[in-house]
Image (cartoon, rainbow, N blue to C red):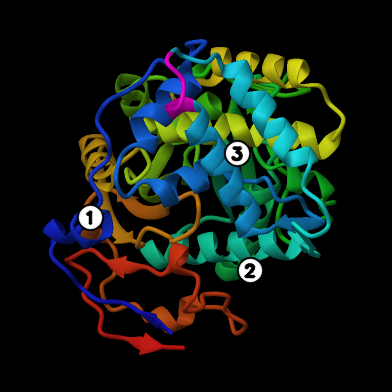
Amino acid sequence: MLQLISFSPTAIGGPLESFEPVQHRLDSKSNYFIHDYLKLHGENIGRHADLSKVLTYHCDSGSFSISNEYKERLIADMVGLAKDVSRKLPNAVFIEKLCDWYRNATTINKQSVATDVTAHLSRKGNDIATMIMEVNPDLGRGSKKLKVLDIGGNDGKLTSYVSASLAEASGLYVEPYVLEVDTETGWDENSKTVQLESRKNCGSVKKIIYDGTNMSSGKVAGSDCANPLVEGGKFDCVMYQHSLHHFPSDGVQQYSIKQAADLLKEGGVLTVTEHSSRLSGDDIDLMHVVIELYKKLHEDPDISPAQLERTYNQYMEAETPANYMSQERLIAMATKAGFTPVTVTPTSPGPDNAYSINFVKGDQKMIEKTRQLENLLYPASTLKADQLKYQTTFIPHLTRSNSFS
């Protein structure tokens, strides 16, 4: 059941953001970062569930799931190591503990699972496309195609599914692009198992590599064609899917959103999915690097702790610190860049504590107020009651009382 309810702007960051983040920020590049993290956060009352999310996120593979009891053993051992010594322990000690814990998981601690990654990406792409069309159902009207830019879209697999659903919803040809820096980090390891087929009314994803700051520096990978961000005309939609927090400072984040606004047509849609400020910057830094460690362990269970430590150091040097985005801060930055917030989702209960906010470029009054939301949903809608990540609530000016399944 999807319910759309009008609420006051003060509600954003109220019930949806009720947990105050820990304000202290550690040095993620320190040789004692994990020890300092566990001392600071492990001794905070009420943070046990968050520690579990951070230290065991993606420890499950595509073929097995590790039991909660065994995950609890890792948390207890790691926190105990930091608590029971009179001196700081280097990161290598904790990385070796994580490595041993993973290797010593037996069939008793594991449960076989069958993950359909293609179905997951298809469902997620459908949901994101629905949110986009929900903001402006007239997107692309008067044009023959929609242009979509996914900033930080990695391998473009999710971008492809979003674009295919947008093509179906709008009836227009969709031209998708991914904007990325040249990096060896691959966030969604599962998507490597997905083989994309040619899509009706949807082009293949083109990757634009840029310097991480100025979009005009971009160049389509494997091509000598002009930078489409400068000479290819305006875009209809820009996406950030868990990528905005990777920009190294508030200023660079703000600049990126401003450039996104410059790329969009009037009435164009900006959709942003981010980690809630329930997770601190320390949490996100550590959660991201343990994803890399588990990825290595999934690929090679016999990898040495020394090799894992090298992976850890390389990642922390190149990819941190992360800058999480509270809902209030994201709305303030987007509004400053000329966007109007239209819909917001609650923070999801999953390990990433995700939320989405969807914006329109310009004044919301330009969007038709009498549109029928039922027409935006697919017959086999994947917006279900348990998918809180994509259950939207309208921000005032567009009031709705519709309720449907």
Cα gap from disc 3 to disc 2, whole angstroms:
21 Å
Residues 296 and 247: in front is 296
Res. 232 visible in picture: no
Q: Residue at x 33, y 46 (%)?
A: 278
In the image, the segment drawn in magenta is 82-86
Q: Which residue is mark 1?
A: 18
Q: Secondary structure at mark 1?
A: loop
Tell me which amino acid carries mark 2.
Answer: Glu
- Answer few, some or many: residues within 10 Å of disc 1's Cα (few below 14, many 20 plus, some between 14 and 19): few
Answer whether labels 3 and 2 touch (C-beta < 8 Å): no
First in sequence: mark 1 vs mark 2: 1
Question: Considering depth in this image, is 207 or 172 the residue closer to the camera?
Answer: 207
- Residue identified by numbered label 2: 168
Comparing 402 with 148, the one in front is: 402
Q: CA distance from mark 3 to mark 1?
A: 29 Å
* Residue 289 screen position, x and y as percent: 59, 29
Sequence order check, earlier mark of 3 and 1: 1
Is the N terminus in the top left, top right, bottom left or bottom right quadrant? bottom left
